Image (cartoon, rainbow, N blue to C red):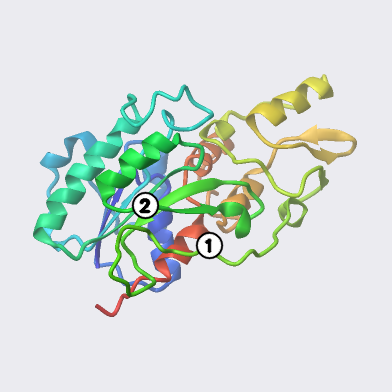
C-alpha cells in the first residue's frame, strides 16, 4: 500500500503499520518540524519527505496510487486549551487542505482509505462542519483505555467494521480497557492520581524543580500533570514516562532531548489507539 501522512509528526501511523505487519510500499510524509523529520527518518529511513502541506500541489506524487491518507490536522484553534477560534482559525483551517487532497485522490482512487483525528474538546459546531466535509461522523476514543493518560480524541475513518447500507458513521468501537494506571508506568516515586492529564505540545517546555514546591505543583496541574511525588517533592515526567503515556517503547525518542521529545509526544497520536483502528483494515484487498 502507498500511504500519505499529513501533519506526520513523529510518525505514529508508520510505526503502527510496522507493528501490525502492514506492507508499505511508499510512505509520503508531510511535516515541517526538523526534529520530527529527524526522528521519523531515524526509525524509517525509507520515508519520503514531501514538506509543507500548503505546497501540496508541487509534490511529486502519483496521486492515483495513494491507498491511505492519514491526517492529524492542527487542534490549536479547536481545543479548550486554545483560544477557540474554530475550524477556520489560522492553524486548524489546514484541515481544509487535507479535504482538498482527499477529494483529489478520491476522484482518482475511489477506494482510498483515510483516518482523520482531532481533539475531543472541540466545539460540537466544528465537529459537525468537519463531519459533513468528510461525509461521516467520528468515533470518540479516550487513550486512557489503553494507556495511563487521559486523551480524549475524535477519529474519522472510512475503515468499516460492519457491512451496512449506512456509511455515515465511523463505526470503530472503543478498545478494551487495559486498566493501566499512572503508578504502573512511572520509573520512581508515587503518583497522586490514577491517570495523567492529557500531555500537550508544551510538555517540551521542561523546567527545573522549583524551590517553592507549592508553586511547582500548581504549575504541574496547569501545564503538565498531577504531581508525581519523589523524596517528598514533586517532579516532572521523565522522557521515558512520556513515551509510555503515548504507548511507545522506552527508547523511541532516545535521539532527541527532553524538550523535543516532549513536544512531539504531546502533539502526537497514541500508538495503541492507531493500531486498534488499523486492525479493522482489510489489507487483503
Element under label 2? loop
The residue positioned 89% from the left and 38% from the top of the image is 231
Instruction: Identify which residue, 149 or 169, lies in the foreground.
Output: 169
Q: Can I make out residue 31 in this image?
A: no
Count up the numbered dots: 2
Instruction: Identify which residue, 220 or 151, lies in the foreground.
Output: 151
Structural distance between the alpha carbons of marks 1 and 2: 15 Å
Q: Which residue is mark 2?
A: 137
Question: For this view, does 261 lie left or right of residue 52?
Answer: right
Label 2 neighbour load within 10 Å: few <14, some 14-19, many 20+: many
The residue positioned 45% from the left and 59% from the top of the image is 274
Question: For this view, does 202 lie left or right of residue 164?
Answer: right
| Quarter occupied by the N terminus | bottom left
Q: Which residue is mark 1?
A: 174
Q: Quadrant of residue 62?
A: bottom left
Q: Can I make out residue 17 in this image?
A: yes
Instruction: Identify which residue, 148 or 87, lies in the foreground.
Output: 87
Direction front: furthest residue: 165
Vertical relation: 231 (above or below) 23: above
Direction bottom: furthest residue: 284
Residue 48 rendering spot, x and y as whole percentages: 25, 53
- Please state which of the two labelled residues, at mark 1 or mark 2, is closer to the viewer: 2
| Quarter occupied by the C terminus | bottom left
Residue 81 rendering spot, x and y as whole percentages: 53, 28
Label 1 neighbour load within 10 Å: few <14, some 14-19, many 20+: some
The label number, if any, that marks residue 107 in the structure image: none
Instruction: Identify which residue, 171 or 54, lies in the foreground.
Output: 171
Element under label 1? loop
Question: For this view, does 171 lie left or right of residue 105?
Answer: right
Amino acid at each position: 500500500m502507498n500511504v500519505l501522512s499529513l501533519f506526520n509528526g513523529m510518525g505514529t501511523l508508520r510505526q503502527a503499520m510496522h507493528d501490525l505487519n502492514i506492507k508499505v510500499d511508499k510512505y509520503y510524509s508531510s511535516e515541517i518540524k526538523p526534529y520530527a523529520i529527524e526522528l521519523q527518518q531515524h526509525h524509517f529511513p525509507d520515508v519520503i519527505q514531501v514538506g509543507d502541506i500548503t505546497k501540496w500541489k508541487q509534490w511529486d506524487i502519483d496521486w492515483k496510487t495513494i491507498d491511505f491518507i492519514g491526517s492529524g490536522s492542527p487542534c490549536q484553534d479547536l481545543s479548550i486549551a486554545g483560544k477557540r477560534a474554530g475550524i477556520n482559525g489560522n492553524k486548524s483551517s489546514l484541515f481544509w487542505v487535507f479535504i482538498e487532497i482527499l477529494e483529489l485522490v478520491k476522484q482518482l482512487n475511489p477506494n482510498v482509505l483515510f483516518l482523520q483525528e482531532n481533539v475531543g474538546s472541540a466545539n460540537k459546531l466544528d465537529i459537525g462542519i468537519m463531519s459533513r466535509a468528510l461525509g461521516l461522523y467520528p468515533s470518540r476514543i479516550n487513550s486512557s483505555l489503553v494507556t495511563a493518560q487521559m486523551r480524549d480524541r475524535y477519529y474519522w475513518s472510512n475503515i468499516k467494521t460492519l457491512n451496512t447500507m449506512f456509511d455515515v458513521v465511523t463505526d470503530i468501537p472503543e478498545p478494551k480497557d487495559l486498566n493501566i494506571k499512572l503508578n504502573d508506568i512511572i520509573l520512581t516515586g508515587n503518583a497522586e492520581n490514577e491517570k495523567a492529564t492529557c500531555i500537550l505540545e508544551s510538555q517540551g517546555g521542561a523546567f527545573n524543580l522549583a524551590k517553592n514546591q507549592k508553586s511547582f505543583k500548581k504549575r504541574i496541574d496547569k501545564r503538565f500533570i498531577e504531581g508525581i511525588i519523589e523524596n517528598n517533592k514533586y517532579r516532572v515526567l521523565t522522557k521515558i514516562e512520556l513515551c509510555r503515556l503515548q504507548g511507545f517503547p522506552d527508547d523511541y525518542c532516545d535521539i532527541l532531548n527532553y524538550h523535543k521529545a516532549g513536544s512531539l509526544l504531546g502533539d502526537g497520536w497514541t500508538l495503541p489507539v492507531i493500531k486498534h483502528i488499523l486492525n479493522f483494515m482489510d489489507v487483503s484487498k
